[in-house]
Amino acid sequence: MKKFPVVVLVLLLAAQAAFSQSKALDPLWTVSSKSYPAAGKFGVPKSWAPGQYVVVGQLSNGKRDSVTTTLVVAKVGNGWVIENSSVDKAGKESVMQMLLGNYDTAMKTGDASQIELVWIKTLEKDGSVTKTEGQSLIVMKTLMKSSYEKMIVNLSEYVDGGSVQVPAGTFAGTTVVTAKTKILGKTIETESWFHPSVPVNGMVKSRTKDDKSVSELISFGFDGKPRIP
């Protein structure tokens, strides 16, 4: 029986794993030929309503990294329940809901710092749901702050972004925004394109200036159903 050198076997296994990971997101990365005409200047996203959702694909260094569905679940007082369902390149899925308090006030003032993370629910592998709130949320609030604050989009200046093509289709008359964000002492410059037809936050595409990280809209709709009751 012929024996493979250990290094060759390791390389074969690594190649197989990489191939498997590259295929995990393919069924979710659908492509549409739809076209969305210019619909006026983008200022703020559509008013939220239960059922609105967007599916966004993330690429890292040009390779598919994950697919995330963000769904508006329900309004609670002056806040909203949002659900994020993500699948990574290995096919691992995670589902989480969070209650964002004071969201409506933050939208009106354009001040994302007013948003309060009230609780988080996580769907476990056995189907059970874990809820985290109170003092247990302190660390999570710090880690997730930049993520949920991105849902507040108020544009004071209109810059024509032209037509943008993504898996969800072709969007004419977009608005492009350039921003600088400091993360762990490093300044990251991004470009983002928005369109009035898209719910949740209106984003069609976003990329870092070095193109190492890209997010693109795969699909969106208004009849989504939550995974967590």
Image (cartoon, grey):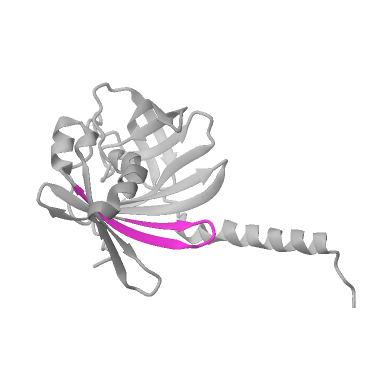
Q: In the rendered view, would you say 141 is above or below 76?
A: above
Q: Is residue 52 visible?
A: no
Mainly helix, strand or loop, the magenta region?
A: strand
For residue 126, above or below residue 11: below
Q: Quadrant of the C terminus?
A: bottom left
- Residue 105 magenta: no
- Residue 195 placement (x, y as % from top left): 30, 36
Report if residue 125 is visible in the image: yes
Which quarter of the figure has residue 95? Answer: bottom left
| Residue, far bottom | 1
Q: Where is residue 51 shown, x and y percent of the image?
A: 22, 57
Q: Position of residue 156 (x, y in %)?
A: 23, 23
Against 179, residue 145 (above or below) is: below
> Horizontal placement of 112 versus 146: left or right?
left
Residue 160, horizontal then vertical, whole percent: 34, 24
Count of numbered tags: 0
The answer to if 99 sits in the magenta stretch is yes
Which corner quadrant holds the N terminus? bottom right
User: Could you tell whether 14 is left or right of 48 in the image?
Assistant: right
- 217 sits left or right of 111 in the view: right
Question: Is 136 or 109 nearer to us in this picture?
Answer: 136
Segment tinted magenta in the rendering:
84-100
